[in-house]
């Protein structure tokens, strides 16, 4: 009898171990309840309303007891779901909460470590509660209604993407010193304030858009493209960036002044366009920049363009816009370029409109004067004809 009991106990233990180490697709409330028996779940947990009709009407997910998930926790396509709670979970390989249109609260009060976070297309989500993020790889929060983020204290991350969260205005990643992948910050709350104050290197691209303040003061190296679009702050200083291994693009910002004081090389192209308040690329803008192997595109109301250290531009330089700078002046300043295409139009500030800029501007003004003479002569002829009637 004792032997039979022992075998039964071992079988139960084995069954319990198996239930905590095999991938599971949750199909009922009882499946969710069974998860509480596993303090460590060594596989994937998938809760997908599109795959399992029996859970499509779930409004609440609450799982106590699970402290660690070595695989993935995926919660998606549950259109009636309102709240999710894993009160004991401290770490997970992956947490994906995707396409749940009515979920408004995620409660993970002890969570600190996560390899892959994806909170995407949960437009009603207002609260994402976690203890802190001290260890992470991929960190994405996209298209939510979240108003604030809990502390992010990790010193290293792979990717960080925070986009289309229209209530989120404080994005503090000042603990991050190194990133292996990319940064994308865009289209969050009005007057969004972004800090990567300790960041020194980015292994992928770095893109910032729709930002009110930005601290990247220690950023030294970017291995891919560096882009800033439609930002509202007026002065951009990238004080420590010495090397951008691909392109730099500054477009449609409110910049009045920009400064890259120690940048020496750009690996591909330089593009500065439609920054309506930026009237000058001065000697202090890119004072140490020596080489651009690709192209240069400059469009704006420029009164001055100066690159005091520039020795080579491998590709085409394209200049356009309206300011006080003439094509002749620009060509002299950009003598390092092999080929320049210029369509700059100078602004005539004189009261009588007789002063001319470069040759291109002169021909336009000459044409305008000839048109005026013809119009005057025609008016006189018409008046004389009318007098003879």
Image (cartoon, rainbow, N blue to C red):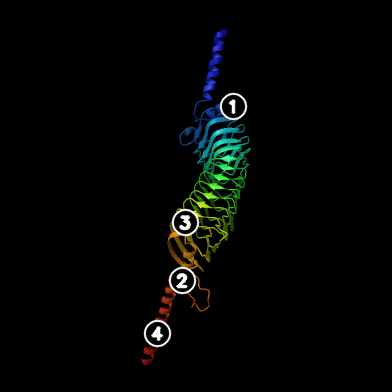
The CA distance from mark 1 to mark 3 is 62 Å
Question: At numbered mark 2, what does the secondary structure look like: helix, strand or loop?
Answer: loop
Q: Mark 4 — residue?
A: 377
The CA span between labels 1 and 2 is 77 Å
Q: Sequence order check: which comes first, mark 4 or mark 3?
A: 3
Q: Is label 4 in a helix, a strand or a loop? A: helix
Q: Label 1, on which residue?
A: 39
Where does the image place residue 48, in percent across and percent down from the top left? 49, 35
Tell me the mark number nearer the camera, choosing from 1 and 4.
4
Q: Secondary structure at mark 1?
A: loop
Which residue occupies the foreground of this view, 254 or 300? 300
Q: Quadrant of the N terminus?
A: top right
Instruction: Answer with mark 4 or mark 2, whichever residue precedes in sequence.
Output: 2
Q: Looking at the image, is mark 1 or mark 3 nearer the viewer? A: 3
> Which residue bears the numbered disc 2?
358
Question: Where does the image place residue 331, in percent across and percent down from the top left?
Answer: 46, 64
* Cα distance between the residues tagged 2 and 3: 25 Å
Mark 1 and mark 4: span between their CA atoms? Answer: 95 Å
Among numbered discs 1 and 4, the one appearing first in the sequence: 1
Residues under numbered marks 4 and 2 in contact, where contact means CB atoms less than 8 Å apart: no
């Amino acid at each position: 009898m004792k032997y039979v009991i022992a075998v039964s106990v071992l079988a139960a233990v084995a069954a319990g171990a198996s239930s905590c180490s095999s991938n599971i697709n949750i199909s009922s409330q009882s499946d969710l309840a069974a998860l509480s028996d596993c303090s460590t779940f060594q596989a994937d947990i998938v809760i997908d309303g599109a795959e399992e009709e029996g859970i499509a009407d779930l409004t609440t997910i609450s799982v106590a007891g699970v402290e660690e998930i070595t695989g993935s926790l995926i919660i998606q396509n549950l259109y009636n779901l309102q709240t999710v709670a894993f009160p004991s979970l401290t770490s997970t390989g992956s947490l994906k909460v995707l396409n749940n249109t009515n979920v408004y609260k995620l409660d993970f009060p002890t969570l600190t470590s996560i390899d892959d976070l994806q909170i995407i297309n949960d437009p009603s989500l207002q609260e994402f509660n976690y203890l802190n993020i001290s260890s992470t790889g991929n960190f994405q929060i996209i298209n939510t209604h979240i108003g604030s983020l809990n502390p992010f204290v990790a010193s290293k991350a792979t990717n960080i993407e925070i986009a289309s969260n229209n209530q989120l205005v404080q994005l503090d990643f000042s603990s991050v010193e190194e990133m292996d992948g990319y940064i994308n910050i865009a289209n969050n709350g009005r007057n969004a304030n972004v800090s990567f104050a300790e960041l020194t290197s980015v292994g992928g691209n770095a893109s910032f858009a729709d930002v009110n303040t930005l601290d990247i003061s220690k950023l030294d190296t970017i291995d891919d493209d560096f882009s800033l679009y439609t930002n509202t702050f007026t002065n951009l200083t990238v004080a420590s960036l010495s090397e951008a291994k691909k392109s730099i693009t500054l477009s449609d910002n409110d910049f009045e002044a920009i400064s890259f004081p120690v940048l020496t090389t750009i690996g591909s192209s330089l593009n500065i366009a439609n920054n309506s308040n930026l009237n000058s690329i001065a000697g202090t803008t890119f004072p140490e920049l020596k080489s651009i192997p690709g192209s240069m595109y400059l469009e704006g109301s420029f009164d001055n363009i100066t690159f005091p250290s520039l020795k080579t531009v491998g590709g085409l330089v394209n200049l356009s816009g309206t300011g006080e700078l003439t094509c002749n002046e620009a060509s002299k300043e950009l003598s390092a370029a092999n080929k320049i295409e210029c369509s700059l139009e100078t602004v005539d500030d004189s009261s009588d409109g007789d002063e001319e800029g470069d040759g291109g501007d002169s021909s336009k003004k000459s044409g305008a004067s000839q048109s005026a003479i013809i119009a005057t002569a025609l008016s006189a002829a018409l008046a004389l004809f009318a007098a003879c009637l």
